[in-house]
Amino acid sequence: MAEKQELTGPDFEAGIADGDIPEGTPVVGHAHGEPVVIVRSGDRCFAVGATCSHYGGPLGEGIVVGDTIRCPWHHARFDLQTGDAIAAPALSPVPCYEVLRKEGRLVVGPKKPVPKPPVTLPVSPKAVVIIGAGASGAAAAERLRRLGYTGTIMLIGDEPPGPVDRPNLSKDYLAGTAPEEWIPLRSRKFYEKNAVELRIGDAVVDIDTSRKIVVLESGGSVPYDALLLAVGAAPVRLALEVGAGAPPVFTLRTLADAHQIIEAATKAKRAVVIGSSFIGLETAASLRTRGLEVDVVGRDRLPLERVLGEELGHFVQQIHEAQGVCFHLQASPRSVGSRGVELEDGRVLPADLVVLGVGVRPRTELASKAGLQVDNGIVVDPFLRTSAPGIWAAGDSARYPEARLGTLVRIEHWVVAQRQGQAAAHDMLGLGAPFRDVPFFWSQHYDIRLAYVGHAASWESAEVVGDIASRDAIVAYRRGGRVLAVAAVGRDRQSLAIEAALESGDEDKIESLLRS
């Protein structure tokens, strides 16, 4: 998925003056035919690949926090000492090189070998079962093996073909600018090589917590010592009357959904997207890229206003309108018929296809049936443990204590889901710590990427720093004067730095960074 970068900057094989590497700031060059960054931390210098293994982001434009380097695009983190991808969305490491000192110069030597996991683990369950082959489940399975777990892992999913890059389904893939081979997170061969049994299409229908088994739709059962519920969420479907001759009505959650929308779009001229949510607007952008006329129907006064505030909501609307999207706001659909989508006020919007983007609901049926605590999600503790021993939950279905807010939250972000899966894997092996990662998500609208860090379910003020219209701004969401979250347009590095300050709880640093 990452494109090969052009080699720029100094030749690190020839060396660079030791004094030319500042403290804590990546310096981009190249070695052994690959882009490389060198980072100084005190008396130590590190060299790692300069290209993020997620979407090819430029690590040289990221920031250094401790012994990590963080990607400016989607906030992946890599260990400077090993190159390991230690926090999603990147799952694969970047190359890590020896750094040699020769006559006052730093020279990048050969690649370091991939470090081996620890020989022994504090806890080693005989069998791990993961229900849900989405972001959390796939990330957990990989992290278990990366940590040196050698027991059995079964990854059970009900969506073929298995783990896919779900954020791409409403973005480049739906727009037709990303090939099919980008979509699977990993191949079948990858799971076979790592001894992960990928079981797709045979859903779990029951969990027997006393016998520690999961019961499959086919009638079989699978024992577990550690169980992760990574069951995600299901799209909300409105109770719309659909008449004879009506255009097809889709939701967008799975690869199969994307295939159906793409097939319908190849024969369509007009589409109606119901819901001015992130997924609704990304779908609208993708269908416009395919050349369809697109109407968006939303109940809000401005798209995304409840999440991003008035200024950013207006900006997003303008971006879409400049691309030809027509908005029908503070409106609701009544029915879908042969003439298109009829609104409550009687207007009819012609449509050859309709996509619903009105939110999702956590899938909690299995947990409820098994007697786990459920309250707008599967309730977990700071270690992502459920109310039943030996069972963890992560991702869109988990409701967890957010460290900075001190309240239970359920967050539907891809990166949060992946990182929670990774955190649960650590805890299963006795290596866990309270989950404290700052929530992060990104959203793509044509050539504009929005980055959001923190969590503000509600706020008292949305303070704009910079100029949104110039695509150069940070919006800080405050309650009681305290910054809960920030959204960034065109300020990737600043967004990264504020995320790190939110992570450390340094309120003064957050305020300073907003003005930088």
Image (spheres, helix red, strand yellow):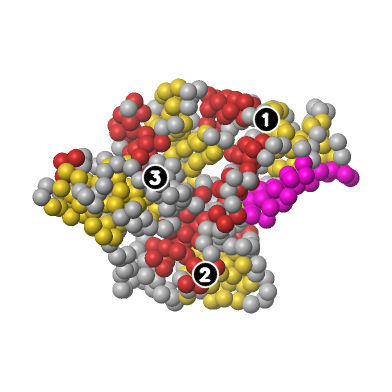
- Find the distance from the CA under tag 2 to the CA under tag 1: 42 Å
Amino acid at the residue labelled 3 = Glu
Q: Are marks 2 and 1 in contact (CB under 8 Å)?
A: no
Residue with the mark numbered 1: 325
Residue with the mark numbered 2: 189
Q: Secondary structure at mark 2?
A: helix
**Of labels 1 and 3, the one closer to you:** 3
- Find the distance from the CA under tag 3 to the CA under tag 2: 31 Å
Please give the label number shown on residue 244: none
Tell me residue 473's x, y (percent).
44, 27
In primary-sequence order, the first of circles 1 and 3 is 3
Amino acid at the residue labelled 2 = Lys
Neighbourhood count class around disc 2 (C-alpha, 10 Å): few under 14, some 14–19, many 20 upward: few
Q: Secondary structure at mark 3?
A: loop
Residue at the spot 37% in from the left edge and 34% down from the top edge: 494
Using the image as rendered, state which of residue 404 and residue 411 is in the foreground.
411
In primary-sequence order, the first of circles 2 and 1 is 2
- Find the distance from the CA under tag 1 to the CA under tag 3: 36 Å
Tell me if residue 308 is in the magenta stretch: no
